[in-house]
Amino acid sequence: MLSLHRSPANTAPPFEERWWSSDDSLRLYARDYAGAGGGIHLPVVCLHGLTRNSADFEGVAPYIAATGRRVIVPDIRGRGLSDYDTDPKNYHLWTYAKDVLDLCDGLGIARAIFISTSMGGLTTMVLSTLRPALIKAAVLNDVGPVLSAKGLTRIAGYAGKNRSEIKSWHEAADYARLHNEIAFPDYGHKDWMAFARRLFREGDDGLKLAYDPAITIPVSAPTSPAVYDMMPLYMSLSTGRPLLLVRGALSDLIEDHEVKVMQGISPDLTRVDVEGVGHAPMLTEASSKAAVLEFLQDLP
């Protein structure tokens, strides 16, 4: 069941807060941005990456909503404001996809455009097999059915590690820079402070990463993209749908030869490479924003 929370007028963010319950009774959270002019177009659902949350789209959702599209951005279970799962085995793509289906059902969304980063893109591929009619078109942000071992190894090196020693936002910014500077070499301190505020959550006991460290436990399970054949799911997603691939030119997760495999399967795949950025573009860069808006412009 979905519920709506409204913030006091003097602190209201540019979105409404939605809460819904999963089949296994977790309380899950999403941001709901109203489309300008009443949202006359298909809505957009944005799905974040492995260790991230809905805040990743705080610079993206407003510019899409300004075009008249409602934008829904959930915190996948175990991230952000959504409940953590007591059974880590549930942290896998098919559970995430089912949670998204429940959210869409609760909001009355029968068809949408998906914009998905990294793990969110893999979840979108799963959704295309569970409910094909839901997805009108998709933007895949720095992800494909074949992922580079180099990038997966780098992510595994920090994801899920306890960072209890971080005591201040400056230390949080240093942490963000340490693990992401390879992707954003031109960022300055102000950028890393903003990045840190998306990665961490402040509570009574200090700063904590805004995700359950246990999300990485199932990484070697059969449903892990590291070992599971995602190609049939990508083929499902790419069949009969417009697709846009946004790739960081410096990405170590989806390299050029892996993109060419995708293009071989989907000759009509539109590709844009974001210069000076690795995994994954924030979709606020000039080239990625322009590509996303142009892609959406041709859709109902």
Image (cartoon, helix red, strand yellow):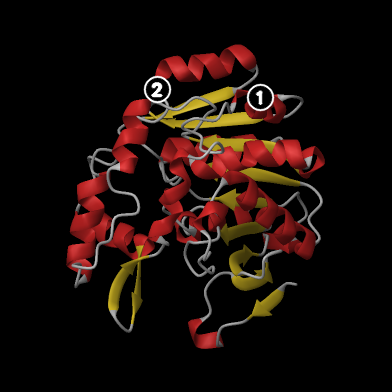
- Residue depicted at 48% across the width and 40% down the height: 118
Disc 1 is placed on an element classified as: helix
**Residue 43, x across and y down, in percent:** 71, 52
Q: Amino acid at mark 2?
A: Glu
Residue at (45% x, 39% y) in the render: 220
Between residues 291 and 178, which one lies in front from this camera angle? 178
153, 248: nearer the viewer: 153
Q: Which residue is mark 2?
A: 255
User: Looking at the rendering, which quadrant does residue 113 occupy?
Assistant: top right
Within 10 angstroms of label 1, few (less than 14), some, or many (20 or more) residues?
few
274 vs 225, left or right, is: left
Side of 105 where 163 appears, left or right: left
Occupied quadrant, residue 244: top right
Q: Which residue is mark 1?
A: 232
Question: 82 above or below 229?
Answer: below
Quadrant location of the N terminus in the rendered image? bottom right
Quadrant, the C terminus: top right
Task: Name the side, left or right, on which 18 lies relative to 186.
Answer: right
Q: Position of residue 254 (x, y in %)?
A: 42, 27
- Disc tally is 2
